[in-house]
Image: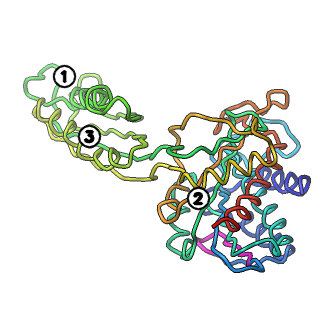
């Protein structure tokens, strides 16, 4: 299966597609499923749900692989380099899709060993946090008892897998702030309410939330990535615009963030006689691995990589909309190492030089396959 999966991954890598426009990728997935003899249905515009029913009754487990690429110019010179200018698979989704097709092929051949049903989610639009919701709205999670996903991970060496229980990836949310002051001449500040000053004060005060309001044991990031205000050196700005993101692991803390940030924003603006409004949008929930599902995953890893294949890896502040599936059924997300400096697979995700050690594809395919079988046999 290894060469088959590698060939698929390279094909997907050379033809990347953006979120909800994965039409060629979706077509190729369906072609391969038809060759294998696995039933499927379309959903969420470009998404595909395949179903494999075992020859024994039992529960239903879902395996998920995402398939969208990024607006990144590829800087590698490999033979499978992206053929689309300004677009590349810089996060490993090409590998996720290929591994899941490989798992479908193996599982279909092992129907006699399957106690229940396996669903395979080929998910679009992970990078825009739209795909999981869209698949759920199209009924993907109906009847699913457990959900399992893999993310190839560039900070972990090939041959190591991290799938411990508890928080693994952060809830990633978005906020924007609009500031209203009073513009005027730069020489007469007493006649104005300076939106540049107010916006700057808001940015600085937001930083005190983490250091002075949140419990030290709770991880929280509050990042302002955009501040726009003013038009000319001698004009006091009337308006300001701020955008930022929060990253959190504690679901209860996450619920409180709109109130906390809103209070800081409103009262800071009042201090300077200005007005400010907050628009806070929850985007992706934190990924929190279920203890039972993590235990099954670690047993599977140990079965074919030994105890040395299991790595305890710190949770990360990146976001993943896989979390929305996990809100509806217990599950686990595994970080499968794909780093190998000798193969130049040593660049971070979303970098133009990003690539994977393709030996990781065999590990991921086996993990998908054996998790499904183990979960169904032991549930």
Label ID, residue 186: 1
Which residue carries the number 3 mark?
A: 261
Q: In the image, what residue occupies the spot 23% across and 46% down?
A: 259
Answer with mark 2 or mark 3, whichever residue precedes in sequence: 2
**Residue pushed farthest front?**
378
Residue 349 magenta: no
- Indicate the position of residue 158 as horizontal and vertical percent values: 78, 37
Highlighted magenta segment, given as a residue range: 43-53
Q: Secondary structure at mark 1?
A: loop
Q: Is residue 23 left or right of residue 291?
A: right
- Indicate the position of residue 89 as horizontal and vertical percent values: 71, 47
Q: In the image, what residue occupies the spot 71% across and 50% down?
A: 299
Give the position of the N terminus as an image quadrant: bottom right
Question: Disc 2 or disc 3, which is closer to the eye?
Answer: 3
Marks 2 and 1: in contact by CB < 8 Å? Answer: no
For disc 2, the neighbor class at 10 Å (few under 14, some 14 to 19, many from 20) is many
Q: Secondary structure at mark 2?
A: loop
Q: Is residue 208 visible?
A: yes
Which residue carries the number 2 mark?
A: 125
Question: Disc 3 or disc 1, which is closer to the eye?
Answer: 3
**Could you say which quadrant of the image residue 233 lies in?**
top left
- Indicate the position of residue 122 as horizontal and vertical percent values: 67, 64
Q: Secondary structure at mark 3?
A: helix
Q: How is the image coloured?
A: rainbow
């Amino acid at each position: 299966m290894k060469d088959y999966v590698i060939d698929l991954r390279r094909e997907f890598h050379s033809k990347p597609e953006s979120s909800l426009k994965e039409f060629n990728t979706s077509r190729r997935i369906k072609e391969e499923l038809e060759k294998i003899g696995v039933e499927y249905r379309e959903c969420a515009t470009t998404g595909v749900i395949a179903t494999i029913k075992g020859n024994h009754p039992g529960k239903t487990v879902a395996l998920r692989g995402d398939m969208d690429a990024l607006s990144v110019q590829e800087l590698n010179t490999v033979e499978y380099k992206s053929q689309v200018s300004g677009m590349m698979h810089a996060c490993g989704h090409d590998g996720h899709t290929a591994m899941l097709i490989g798992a479908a092929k193996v599982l279909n051949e092992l129907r006699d060993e399957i106690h229940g049903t396996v669903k395979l989610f080929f998910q679009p639009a992970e990078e825009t946090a739209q795909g999981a919701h869209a698949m759920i709205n199209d009924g993907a999670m109906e009847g699913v008892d457990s959900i399992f996903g893999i993310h190839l991970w560039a900070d972990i060496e090939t041959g190591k897998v991290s799938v411990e229980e508890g928080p693994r990836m952060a809830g990633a949310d978005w906020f924007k702030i609009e500031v209203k002051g009073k513009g005027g001449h730069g020489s007469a500040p007493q006649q104005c309410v300076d939106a540049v000053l107010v916006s700057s004060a808001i940015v600085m005060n937001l930083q005190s939330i983490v250091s002075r309001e949140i419990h030290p044991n709770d991880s929280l990031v509050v990042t302002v990535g955009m501040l726009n205000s003013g038009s000319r050196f001698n004009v006091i700005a009337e308006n300001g615009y701020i955008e930022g993101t929060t990253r959190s692991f504690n679901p209860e803390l996450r619920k409180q963030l709109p109130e906390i940030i809103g209070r800081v924003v409103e009262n800071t603006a009042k201090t300077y006689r200005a007005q400010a409004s907050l628009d806070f949008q929850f985007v992706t929930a934190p990924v929190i691995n279920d203890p039972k599902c993590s235990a099954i995953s670690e047993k599977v890893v140990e079965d074919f990589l030994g105890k040395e294949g299991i790595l305890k890896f710190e949770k990360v502040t990146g976001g993943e909309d896989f979390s929305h599936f996990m809100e509806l059924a217990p599950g686990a997300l595994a970080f499968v190492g794909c780093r190998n400096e000798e193969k130049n697979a040593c660049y971070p995700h979303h970098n133009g030089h990003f690539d994977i050690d393709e030996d990781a594809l065999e590990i991921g395919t086996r993990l998908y396959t054996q998790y499904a079988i183990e979960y169904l046999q032991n549930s």
